[in-house]
Image (tube, rainbow, N blue to C red):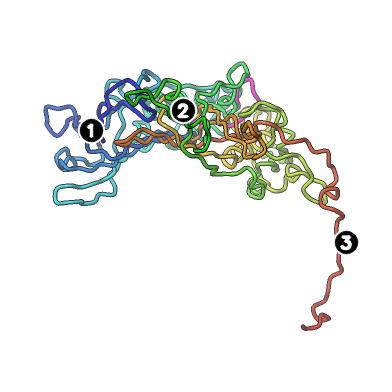
Amino acid sequence: MALKHQDVIEAAGDYVLKGVILHNHEGEGVKVEDEGTNIAPLILEFNIQESLYNNSVIGTAVVLDTQNVIGNLPIQGTERISFKLSTPGAHGSASIDCSVKTGHPMYVYAITDRIQRTGSTVSYILHFSTREFLRNVRTKVSKAYSGRMDEMVYSIFKDEAALDSRKDFDFQKTRNQDKIVIPNLPPFKAIAMISKRSLADNSKSNGFLFYETTKGFQFRSWESLCIDTNGNPRPPKQIFEYRPANIDKREKAIRVKAGGKQTPDALLDSFEEVEKYKFLNSTHDTAANQAIGTYAQRVITHNIYDKSYKISDYNYHTSFSETSHTDKGTTNYVVVKTPVDYDNKALSDYPEAKVTVMPTTRFTHGEDTGAFGVDVEQDGVIEGKRDSKRSEIVSGSTLELTIKGQSFLSAGDVIEFNLPNLDANDPKKKPDPHFAGRYIITHLKHRVTDKDYIQVLECVKDAISNPYHPSTVKNYTNIAGRQPSTKRPRDIVSIKDY
């Protein structure tokens, strides 16, 4: 992989990567006097991945070793790897800084796919992650915590006997507090246990995300990714547009001046252009979404203290307006509330599609509270909303975009995608009325090769840009026609053979 040094953008896909330094288990390079060995010229492909669903940033380096670094260093899986990757002109938090200077280099933990190519050349893949990834493997949390949920998470995050992290930690305050005993769990599992029971401050959203990006760690609710602390939609970090090859605007965007350099407008335009896109998930798999309780579910809470039980039903359409989503609006449902069967019920009117039995924890620690540190009577309602929201995100509209690398982007950022309308009768080619608009990046892969720097984004929206036309139909018969009459059963003995 050729090194890129120039901090001036000439074309989208340019990058600055002045070296990828491998430090052995003693902090040295192949030569003892060096503090590391630069393996960038040997790397064919360099990947870094971050996700809302992963507690750590992970990466790989595909190496074509012509210098026997694997034997001379040697490489055994206890090395550190340091580098700084950025889009030309990006500095500070807009870059990916895993240098020794910051104190946050990556750690090699595995070497796979080793293949002898020639007599003196071998290829292999180095797998690396952050220090916290390995701390999670090596340590356990066995302790009782009391107070706000975000304070518990921060305590585990900074604990020298647990994660012992020195990185930035951005968090959202929780409105609930409780007493929780962590039973000898790895730090990430302990935090996941707390995250499920966390309720956002000044909001009705519940359930938190704990994840790492190349900029640090985050502990926050999904709603906080959509809106700021004042309740306003977060501005998109970048606006992207897909332009088929036959659109004149694309031809204008790639115009170059004499000397082969793009004009400033064309350069900016090329960063906003999507090379390709596809939808990985569709919100219209209503069968699967009903089965996992996205639209409706029932939670039966059993109060162990007084031997009572309570049935709580979650309804997607009723609860939709209680929290904020990627797109602003109280009726921007991904499915409309229209009868779907002769019983005249909508998709959200079948709570028995998923039934969960949940014991309460009242007075476990001497407090008259339930599983979430609030009134025990709310346990079923909160659990139904939390589980349905998780399903709504994971099984919602998932869009994959391939774009030119922009190091300031991270998992959790809001982006806007101007998906063109496929209506042939629309001469202005307005954006798709439902699937264009705001998305949140859930997965982000940085991929650097000798040629360029690209990113593959997986993005999710939990609402549609413009509401579907409201339905006034209340009777399914008006949709499907008159219900067929019930037929009498037939005894197979009386049926004549063909």
Residue 484, compared with residue 84, is above or below; it is below
Eye-nearest disc, 1 or 3:
3
Kindly indicate the quadrant of the structure image that contains residue 398: top right
Q: Position of residue 480 (x, y in %)?
A: 81, 52
Q: Which residue is mark 2?
A: 253
Say which amino acid is labelled 1: Leu
Contact between marks 2 and 1 (CB within 8 A): the answer is no
Say which amino acid is labelled 3: Ser
Cα separation, mark 1 vs mark 3, equals 75 Å
Eye-nearest disc, 2 or 1:
2
Of helix, strand and loop, which one carries label 3?
loop
* Magenta range: 200-210
Q: Position of residue 52 (x, y in %)?
A: 49, 33
Cα separation, mark 3 vs mark 2, equals 63 Å
Q: As drawn, is 493 to the left or to the right of 177?
A: right
How many residues crowd mark 1 within 10 Å: few (<14), some (14–19), many (20+)? many
Tell me the number on the disc at residue 485.
3
Q: Which residue is mark 1?
A: 22
Any part of residue 362 in sight: no
